[in-house]
């Protein structure tokens, strides 16, 4: 069934972690695309439940609480409130913004676990997991850092290396360290319940790879294909934690549900709460109906870092439970960068939504417009303050705002703010009206295929159409010689303005309301868009107001200085940061066992389909061997050929991306993560021993 054929829609946007404020990367990743889509569906008179809420469990919450010296409950209360208020002020039109700490959510999550448990879907097994002896607790994935086995970067987490993107298990890490005590953890036996994803792999391949090949965005399909090609493994659905949803088994005292079992169930519990509050039936938005045609269309809007959880793990959970609908699409976006660098919460390199709303009061739609115009739909994109200023001033102010202001001012000046009849249409008039009729369908097609940048561009073309028509006809000159012609020109211009009121609602809701009040036109039915008689003859217009104001150089400079100050502060903090604690002592014999030689890079090339890896041929003096290293972020292959390096030559070979890597290059890493080769001050013969 095509998306547009559904009568009912369940739209979710990724649950933000309640451990910090929202930034523009979050908006561009999930929330603006979801809100555009939902507002469009409502204009199409569809039945929509748009749900979201704070993700309040998992290690990220407890880590933040420990850093701030307060309880996890205080953390989630603080940030849930801030996030909810920011969404409301910005204009994200959730039907409910819920939270996973709610009783209704805990009960539903436990029901899901028990359903799968009683069906025998879980694998119960004992395994050795890392344990902090000083803090007397097992360590969740994010409580463990170490060296990535793939790119050899320090600071990789127990679930993922954020430098090369490799998904990890804690036991994969080299030299693991507990983030609680700063000491190496020990392995200790514990029991957990695993979801056998490998059991569902044939079903997932059929449902996902075969059934959605022509539906999913290429970036989503590609990531899913890669995961399935690598082969799925059982994944633990429980954790040894002191914060989260209790595992509802007597034998599991002290254990909590894995956050990626509980978090997506938050979409369902939020819908359930909304239904209770409004008298709706939540099941029709989530459960299969007697007639498939009555099923709701489920769509998840997320960022690319959540693809595997929404495309593989959550669908597998729903399938194993039974009775629930599955997502029809998961239109994930890539990442948004800021001023030539990655957005970083830890480095405070971000545009925080609550700060933007304070610095630019009443300018929610200006940010919506700019972020929509640069959405990272198929690849990473970049926000800069200069571009923000240019798009607002040159597009919103100079085109859209200018057109609306002129047509309203002239209508009041010449005809007391009344809509005059259009008579004796010219070929130009008919061409403009024909163009106007074409745009709603073009915008619809773009939105329904999740091409929101394209849809916004088409919307702005309507404003350009009106602006050019008015400029070409010059009614301010015609009024002296042909008043009847001016009536026609202003009538057509006002019909374009009324259409813009309708068409703006998904993209610029605050602007649409302001324009509706000026025109006295409050329709909310997409079927009317494109019509040439939305405002009847004699209709009284209200007073004109400026839709937008220019962004000043001073405002932009202030924002750039704020980013610069954050960068300087972070750099100072990095310099003051304590040196990484020394690792446990090793014996002289252990050190002597390492064979480190000087070598020379003979050839170097990037490893295909990776961002970080370089494959090198190195003359070690002993032989010529292949080594793969995650240094492509800092060095171009052609620049390092001929350079002398230090090589650990007796490291056990390891296969990386299908290439056998026979050794490790020694690198120095500064506080900002930048790498430099460790090598002798003067050139030495390849094979010289480093002691």
Image (cartoon, helix red, strand yellow):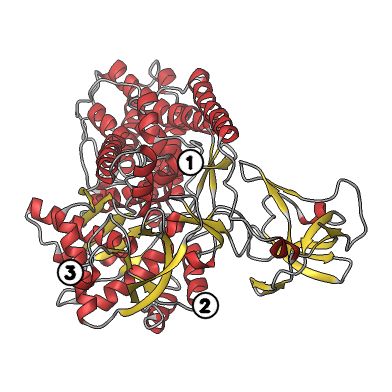
Q: Is residue 182 left or right of residue 634?
A: left
Q: How crowded is mark 1: few (under 14 residues within 10 Å), some or many (20 or more)?
A: few
Q: How many marks?
A: 3
Q: Percent from the top left, x then y, of residue 487?
A: 32, 27
User: In which quadrant will I find the C terminus?
Assistant: bottom right
| Quadrant assignment, res 235 | bottom left
Q: Is residue 583 above or below residue 325?
A: above
| Quadrant assignment, res 659 | bottom right
Instruction: Name the front one of labels 2 and 3.
Output: 3
Give whichever of discs 2 and 3 has the lower sequence position. Answer: 3
The residue drawn where x is 41% and y is 46% is 26
Give whichever of discs 3 and 1 has the lower sequence position. Answer: 3
Secondary structure, mark 1, is loop
Q: Percent from the top left, x then y, of residue 135?
A: 38, 53
Kindly identify which residue carries mark 2. Answer: 229
Kindly identify which residue carries mark 3. Answer: 111
Q: Percent from the top left, x then y, of residue 380?
A: 54, 50
The residue drawn where x is 76% and y is 62% is 605
**C-alpha distance separating marks 3 and 1:** 36 Å
Q: Is residue 154 left or right of residue 87?
A: right
Kindly identify which residue carries mark 1. Answer: 346
The residue drawn where x is 30% and y is 39% is 70
**C-alpha distance separating marks 2 and 3:** 32 Å
| Quadrant assignment, res 409 | top left
């Amino acid at each position: 069934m095509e998306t547009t054929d559904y009568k009912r829609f369940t739209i979710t946007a990724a649950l933000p972690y309640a451990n910090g404020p929202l930034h523009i990367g979050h908006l561009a990743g999930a929330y603006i695309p979801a809100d555009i889509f939902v507002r469009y569906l409502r204009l199409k008179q569809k039945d929509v439940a748009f749900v979201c809420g704070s993700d309040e469990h998992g290690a990220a919450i407890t880590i933040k609480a420990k850093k701030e010296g307060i309880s996890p409950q205080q953390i989630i209360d603080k940030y849930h409130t801030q996030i909810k208020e920011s969404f409301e002020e910005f204009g994200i039109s959730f039907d409910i913004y819920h939270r996973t700490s709610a009783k209704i959510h805990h009960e539903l999550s436990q029901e899901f676990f028990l359903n799968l448990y009683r069906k025998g879907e879980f694998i119960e097994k004992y395994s050795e997991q890392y344990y902090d002896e000083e803090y007397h607790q097992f360590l969740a994935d994010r409580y463990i850092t170490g060296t990535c086995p793939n790119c050899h970067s320090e600071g990789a987490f127990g679930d993922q290396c954020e430098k090369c993107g490799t998904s990890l298990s804690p036991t994969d890490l080299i030299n693991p360290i507990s983030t609680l005590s700063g000491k190496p953890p020990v392995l200790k036996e514990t029991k957990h319940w695993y979801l056998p994803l490998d059991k569902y792999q044939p079903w997932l391949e059929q449902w996902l790879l075969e059934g959605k090949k022509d539906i999913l965005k290429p970036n989503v399909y590609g990531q899913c294909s890669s995961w399935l090609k690598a082969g799925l493994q059982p994944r633990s659905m429980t954790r040894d934690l002191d914060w989260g949803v209790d595992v509802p088994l007597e034998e599991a005292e002290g254990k909590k549900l894995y956050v990626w079992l509980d978090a997506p169930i938050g979409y369902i519990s939020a819908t359930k709460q909304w239904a209770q509050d409004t008298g709706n039936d939540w099941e029709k938005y989530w459960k299969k109906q007697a007639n498939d045609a009555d099923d709701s269309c489920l769509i998840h809007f997320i960022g690319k870092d959540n693809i595997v959880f929404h495309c593989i793990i959550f669908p597998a959970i729903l399938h194993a439970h039974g009775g629930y609908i599955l997502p029809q699409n998961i239109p994930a976006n890539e990442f948004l960068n800021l001023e030539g660098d990655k957005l970083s919460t830890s480095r405070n390199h971000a545009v925080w939504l609550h700060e933007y709303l304070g610095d630019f009061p009443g300018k929610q739609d200006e940010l919506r417009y700019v972020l929509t115009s640069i959405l990272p739909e198929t690849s990473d994109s970049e926000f800069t303050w200069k571009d923000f200023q240019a798009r607002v001033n040159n597009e919103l102010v100079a085109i859209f705002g200018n057109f609306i202001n002129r047509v309203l001012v002239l209508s009041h000046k010449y005809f007391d703010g009344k809509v005059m009849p259009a008579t004796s249409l010219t070929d130009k008039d008919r061409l403009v009206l024909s163009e106007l009729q074409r745009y709603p369908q073009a915008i619809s097609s773009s939105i329904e295929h999740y091409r929101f940048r394209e849809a916004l561009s088409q919307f702005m073309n309507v404003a350009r159409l009106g602006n050019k028509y008015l400029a070409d006809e010059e009614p301010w000159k015609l009024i002296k010689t042909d008043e009847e012609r001016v009536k026609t020109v202003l009538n057509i211009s006002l019909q374009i303005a009324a259409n813009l009121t309708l068409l703006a609602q998904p993209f610029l809701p605050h602007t649409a309301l302001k324009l509706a009040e000026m025109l006295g036109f409050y329709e909310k039915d997409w079927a009317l868009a494109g019509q040439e008689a939305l405002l009847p003859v004699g209709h009284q217009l209200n007073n004109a107001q400026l839709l937008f104001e220019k962004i000043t150089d001073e405002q932009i400079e202030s924002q750039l200085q704020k980013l610069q100050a954050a960068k300087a502060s972070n750099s100072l903090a990095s310099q003051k940061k304590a040196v990484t604690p020394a690792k446990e002592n090793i014996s002289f014999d252990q050190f002597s066992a390492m064979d480190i030689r000087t070598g020379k890079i003979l050839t170097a090339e990037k490893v295909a389909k990776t961002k970080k890896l370089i494959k090198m041929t190195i003359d070690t003096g002993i032989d010529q061997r292949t080594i793969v290293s995650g240094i492509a972020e800092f060095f171009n292959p052609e620049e390092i050929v001929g350079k002398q390096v230090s090589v650990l030559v007796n490291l056990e070979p390891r296969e990386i991306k299908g290439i056998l890597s026979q050794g490790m290059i020694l690198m120095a890493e500064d506080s900002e993560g930048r790498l430099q080769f460790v090598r002798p001050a003067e050139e030495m013969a390849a094979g010289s021993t480093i002691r």
